[in-house]
Amino acid sequence: MDQFFTWELLATFVGAATGTGIITQFVKDVPIFQKIPARFLSYIVALLILAAATAATGGATDWTGWAIIPLNAVLVSFSANGAYDALAKKK
């Protein structure tokens, strides 16, 4: 395996959620993004990842494939946020 992420992996739920979580945590403290709530930032990241992965893999051949991306981005964002909350939770 010569790549950690591929477009095919990012087009899956697990790949998109993992990528969203990693990128959100990496950029949320950048001054330009600090005013954006982390949960909304993760939605934007998920939306961009899913749109790019769909375009790169040819996953949407008509408008219905593109129309579902915003809803899928909500699910991916929730998953990424929940995974972070579970890892960061102090007992």
Image (cartoon, helix red, strand yellow):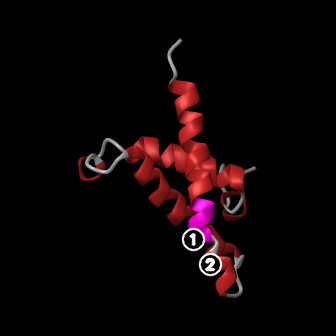
Residue 58: percent from left, percent from top: 70, 79
Question: Which residue is drawn at the image coordinates 70% and 49% (left, top)?
Answer: 14
| Disc 2, SS | helix
Check residue 56 for magenta coloring. Answer: no
Toward which corner of the image does residue 75 lie, by quadrant? bottom right
Q: Residue 37: which disc?
A: none
Q: Residue at x 60, y 64 (%)?
A: 71
The answer to whether residue 74 is visible is yes
Is 46 placed left or right of 40 in the picture? Answer: right
Instruction: Kindly report the secondary structure that dominates the magenta region of the rendered protein.
Output: helix
Q: Residue at x 61, y 45 (%)?
A: 79
| Image location of residue 49, percent across then percent down | 55, 62
Q: Residue at x 58, y 60 (%)?
A: 73
Q: Amino acid at mark 2?
A: Trp
Instruction: Examine the image and state in which quarter residue 7 appears.
Output: bottom right
Residue 65 appears at what percent x and percent y? 68, 78
Q: Earlier in the sequence, mark 2 or mark 1?
A: 1
Is 51 above or below relative to 35? Answer: below
Density class for disc 1 (Cα within 10 Å; few <14, some 14-19, many ≥20) is some
In the rendered image, which residue does mark 1 sit on? 51
Image height of 26 relative to 52, above or below: above
**Span shown in magenta:** 69-73
Q: Indicate the amino acid at tag 1.
A: Ala
> Relative to 8, is 26 above or below?
above
Q: Is residue 37 left or right of residue 73?
A: left
Hey, which residue is sitting farthest top in the picture?
91
Between 76 and 57, the one nearer to me in the picture: 76
Tag 2 near tag 1, CB within 8 Å: yes
| Residue bearing the label numbered 2 | 66
Q: Secondary structure at mark 1?
A: helix
Residue 10 on image: x %, y %: 66, 59
